[in-house]
């Protein structure tokens, strides 16, 4: 269900907007002013905001400008409405990031139609963004193990180096590979080898592991000193050496 947030100090206009949209199946939230606007946006997570420009104590233009400066709300469509009909007012509202400028009074059916059109656009935008993120993740991850691939290494290192400089926190890198991995493939088959790789590519949520080559991995350990990296490395070595991999998933070999 799509959520609409209506911000207007006039209760009759809030009721009018609610009435115009009541048959559209939206969940409607209302506010008489823009106090605590960011907390309200976080709480309601609206798909669209109807913003009156004539709010008490603050210009609706300033509210619009402050919302558009906040990246996490940048994709929320904001429709401003006002009794001001001048071209200058409309231009100012649209230039500050409104997707539409409605002049009061407006016919309820026209209001509903405009909101439907904008909600359709928002839905399509969200679908495209979701698909873009999915494809981006695919381009940066190894399809077998789910670890990052070498294409992602540069961006991960830039982020870690930037954080280390900015917050003076350490990070460490560990390169490791799997001994005798060719024997696993030769003896048990490549499906079993794939199983081993997938089980090894497990890491803490705050860390990043990159599949660097066939059985080579690079672990980037966040907030980890050199001594901590040594401890992690030895623990990882011992764990892999003692690991009994899940034999239930090892495919039977065909010896014919």
Image: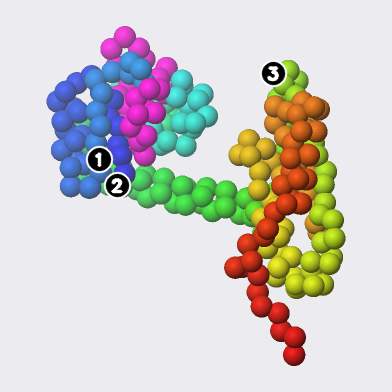
Q: Earlier in the sequence, mark 1 or mark 2?
A: 2
According to the picture, the residue beneath numbered tag 2 turns out to be 1
Task: Tell me the quarter of the picture where residue 29 sits.
Answer: top left
Residue 106 location (% of width, % of height): 22, 35
Q: Earlier in the sequence, mark 3 or mark 1?
A: 1
The reply to whether dot 1 and dot 2 touch (C-beta < 8 Å) is: yes
Q: Closer to the observer: label 3 or label 1?
A: 3
For residue 194, the mark is: none
* Range of magenta residues: 38-64
For residue 167, the mark is: 3
Identify which residue, 233 or 132, lies in the foreground: 233
Whether residue 82 is visible, yes or no, is: no
Residue 116 location (% of width, % of height): 31, 47
Q: Closer to the observer: label 3 or label 2?
A: 3
Q: Quadrant of the C terminus?
A: bottom right
Task: Tell me the quarter of the picture where residue 254 sits.
Answer: bottom right
According to the picture, the residue beneath numbered tag 1 turns out to be 27
Q: Secondary structure at mark 1?
A: strand
Q: Earlier in the sequence, mark 3 or mark 2?
A: 2
Mark pair 3, 1: CA separation: 42 Å
Q: Is residue 169 left or right of residue 125?
A: right
């Amino acid at each position: 269900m799509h959520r609409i947030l209506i911000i207007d100090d006039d209760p009759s206009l809030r009721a009018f907007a609610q009435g115009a949209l009541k048959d559209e199946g939206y969940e409607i939230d209302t506010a008489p002013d823009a106090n605590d606007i960011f907390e309200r946006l976080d709480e309601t997570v609206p798909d669209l905001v109807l913003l009156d420009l004539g709010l008490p104590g603050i210009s609706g233009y300033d509210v619009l400008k402050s919302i558009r400066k906040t990246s996490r709300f940048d994709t929320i469509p904001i429709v401003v409405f006002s009794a001001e009909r001048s071209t200058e007012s409309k231009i100012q509202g649209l230039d500050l990031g409104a997707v539409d400028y409605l002049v009061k009074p407006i016919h309820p059916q026209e209001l509903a139609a405009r909101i439907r059109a904008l909600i359709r656009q928002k839905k399509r935008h969200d679908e495209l963004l979701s698909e873009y993120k999915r494809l981006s993740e695919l381009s940066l991850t190894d399809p077998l193990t789910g670890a990052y691939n070498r294409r992602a290494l540069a961006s991960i290192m830039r982020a870690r180096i930037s954080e280390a400089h900015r917050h003076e926190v350490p990070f460490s890198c560990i390169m490791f590979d799997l001994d005798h991995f060719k024997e696993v493939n030769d003896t048990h088959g490549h499906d079993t080898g794939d199983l081993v790789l997938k089980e090894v590519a497990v890491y803490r949520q705050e860390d990043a592991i990159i599949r660097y080559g066939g059985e080579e991995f690079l672990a980037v350990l966040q907030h980890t000193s050199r001594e901590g990296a040594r401890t992690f490395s030895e623990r990882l070595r011992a764990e892999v050496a003692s690991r009994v991999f899940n034999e239930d998933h090892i495919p039977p070999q065909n010896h014919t």
